[in-house]
Amino acid sequence: MKANRDIKPISYVKAHAAEILLQVNSTKEPLYVTQNGEAKAVIVDTESYESLKEILNFLKMLSIGEKQIKKGEVKKQTEFFNEIENEILK
């Protein structure tokens, strides 16, 4: 992170919104917005944001699966696919 480019006060963001959007979309780097010297928000390009959401959803599914395995909430592969096949054929 380049502090002079990647951290800006809210007043700068208000005055340079179009420039900031060009920056985050071209660099794919987030911009941290401060208010009263404290970080309050992050601006990211939409592609990076969507990618982060997909990664978080995947990690969430892995976490759920890991918890289910620890609890013994598992099925044999053949049983699982048979259930899916039966649901499709209904």
Image (tube, rainbow, N blue to C red):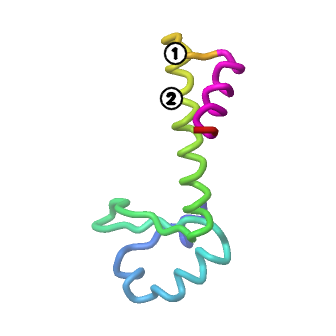
Residue located at (28% from left, 67% from top): 36
**Are the two marked residues, 1 and 2, in contact with CB atoms closer than 8 angstroms?**
no
Q: What is the three-letter code of the residue carrying label 2?
A: Ile
Between tags 1 and 2, which lies in front?
Answer: 1
Q: Front-most of 62 and 86?
A: 86
Q: Is residue 58 above or below residue 82?
A: below
Residue located at (51% from left, 19% from top): 68
Q: Front-most of 45 and 90?
A: 90
- Relative image position of residue 4 (x, y in whole percent): 54, 71
Q: Is residue 78 above or below residue 49?
A: above
Badge 1 is on which residue?
A: 73
Badge 2 is on which residue?
A: 64
- Relative image position of residue 74 (x, y in whole percent): 57, 16
Q: Which residues are magenta?
A: 76-88
Residue located at (65% from left, 19% from top): 79
Left or right: 20 as drawn, with respect to 80:
left
Q: Secondary structure at mark 1?
A: loop
Left or right: 26 as drawn, with respect to 35:
right
**Predominant secondary structure, magenta span:** helix
